[in-house]
Amino acid sequence: MIGTMVLVLMGCGSAVFAGSMAGTVGAGVGTVGVALAFGLSVVAMAYAIGGISGCHINPAITLGVFLSGRMNGKDAGMYMLFQVIGAIIGSAILYALVTTGGHDGPTATGSNGFGDGEMLQAFIAEVVFTFIFVLVVLGSTDPKKGAGAFAGLAIGLSLVLVHIVCIPITGTSVNPARSIGPALFQGGEALSQLWLFIVAPFVGAAVSALVWNYFGDKNEKK
């Protein structure tokens, strides 16, 4: 569910926010950028949840695995059900981002500030993308189910992915320290809106920790 949510949110989100928009930091991403976003989504989730579910995130893959005799029908059906649920959740988050503000790329950590109607959009984006990024970090560095020596690759690629989609929305923070430094020098509106780039990433990180702890508890009981 989480893997398919990330795939839909990031892949489709790159097309919505950075695919063909003029006048933004993300302009010119085009077909290559959207393709990279989908591919990077798979890389990030493969390292984060591959040790738990195999990271199918695609009913067609699940069908192939089932028909090859590598999983039973009950598990295949549950995989497909939660892949669809994950896709719906990803689409709902994307819908919320599109409908709660503009996507002309204002950022409180840069030279522009957010209008009143864009603060909710920015908050949602920073929470969700920090959740995804921290989940990849926790998953890929897990001592039992992690990516081992490839953890750094997974983390770096997932940050690239987050930036592809999130730059046109907030300029991308997902890191309170990264926002505090520039805002102190920028001052003014950037400093007044700094709270968002501190609170939202911490909320996203806390949720990802809860989710990963749930995974860990389930694995220990097996």
Image (cartoon, rainbow, N blue to C red):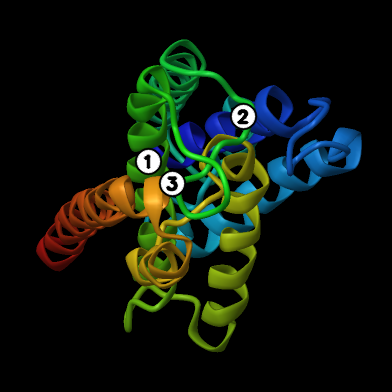
Q: Position of residue 157 (x, y in %)?
A: 64, 65
- Looking at the image, which residue is at 32% across and 43% down? 127
Give SS at disc 1. helix
Does residue 133 lie above or below 169 as drawn?
Answer: below
Task: Identify the mark nearer the N-term, 1 or 2.
Answer: 2
Residue 132 appears in the rendering: yes
55 left or right of 12 in image = left
Q: Are marks 1 and 2 in contact (CB under 8 Å)?
A: no
Task: Identify the mark nearer the N-term, 3 or 2.
Answer: 2
- Looking at the image, which residue is at 12% across and 61% down? 217
Does residue 140 lie above or below 160 as drawn?
Answer: below
Residue 1 appears in the rendering: no
Q: Are marks 1 and 3 in contact (CB under 8 Å)?
A: yes
- Looking at the image, which residue is at 68% across and 22% down? 16
Q: Position of residue 40 (x, y in %)?
A: 68, 53
The type of residue carrying mark 3 is: Phe
Determine which residue is flagged by label 2: 13
Give SS at disc 2. helix
Determine which residue is flagged by label 1: 128
30 left or right of 98 in image = right
When asked about the image quadrant of residue 167, the answer is top right
The type of residue carrying mark 2 is: Gly
The type of residue carrying mark 1 is: Val
> In which quadrant of the rendered image does the N terminus lie?
top left
Circle on res. 16:
none
Q: Give the Cα separation between the discs numbered 3 and 2.
A: 11 Å
Determine which residue is flagged by label 3: 129
5 left or right of 209 in image = right
Q: Nearer the viewer, residue 106 or 8?
A: 106
Q: Give the Cα separation between the discs numbered 1 and 3.
A: 4 Å
- Looking at the image, which residue is at 48% across and 54% down? 109
